[in-house]
Amino acid sequence: MQSTELAIDRRALLRSAILLVGGSMAGLPGEAFAQGKKLTKARFFTPAQYSVLDETAEIIIPKTDTPGARAAGVPSIIDDLMANWASAERGANFRALMDDIDRRALAAGGASLRALPPARRLEFVRAYDAEKIGAKDPVYSRLKELVLTTYYLSEAGATQELRYELVPGKWEAWTTIGPDARAWAV
């Protein structure tokens, strides 16, 4: 017998999980995680800034045997979050960050981030990442946090990157983990 009080949909579960994790995204718009929703164009960032966000997110979480950030829709979710949820100050900081990444790529490699060859893009973003994390840049750290959070809350991140078990088995204090083992989504 199932109680209607206990029935919960996926979006409500995600909102609750976010509140439990820290609540920093309490105003998260429900449509950001709408199943299958992908923006066809940026709503918050300029096309050039969105291109930098898209490439940076894909370098942070690249496609391997599981989908990368781009395939999971991370850039469009972040764009949607900035358009619907972020304060004007945070939005301005994120726009400035995308401009800074592109400007520094141009200075370092002679071309915008997307115009650099793939190996140079990876090299540049790794160096930029090391510098910003070393300097404890709060805006860049927040970008990385949003990329990771939106990826692992996406369907691809929660079901393909992480292992999903609808009904967990028994607890075993000692178990052998093979090379194909993944972390658990639930």
Image (spheres, rainbow, N blue to C red):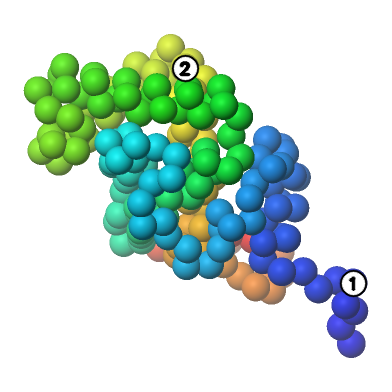
Residue 74, compared with residue 143, is above or below; it is below
Residue 168, compared with residue 118, is above or below; it is below
Under tag 2, what secondary structure?
loop
Looking at the image, residue 96 sits to the left or right of residue 111; the answer is right
Label 1 CA crowd tier, 10 Å (few <14, some 14–19, many 20+) = few
Looking at the image, residue 10 sits to the left or right of residue 132; the answer is right
- Residue 14 screen position, x and y as percent: 67, 56
User: Quadrant of residue 135 in the image?
Assistant: top left
User: Quadrant of residue 174 in the image?
Assistant: bottom right
* Residue that mark 2 sits on: 137
Q: Which mark is residue 5?
A: 1
Q: Between 55 and 42, which is closer to the camera in this rendering?
A: 42
Identify which amino acid the numbered label 2 is placed on: Asp
Under tag 1, what secondary structure?
loop
Q: What residue occupies the far bottom of the structure in this picture?
A: 1
How far is mark 1 from mark 2, CA to CA? Answer: 44 Å
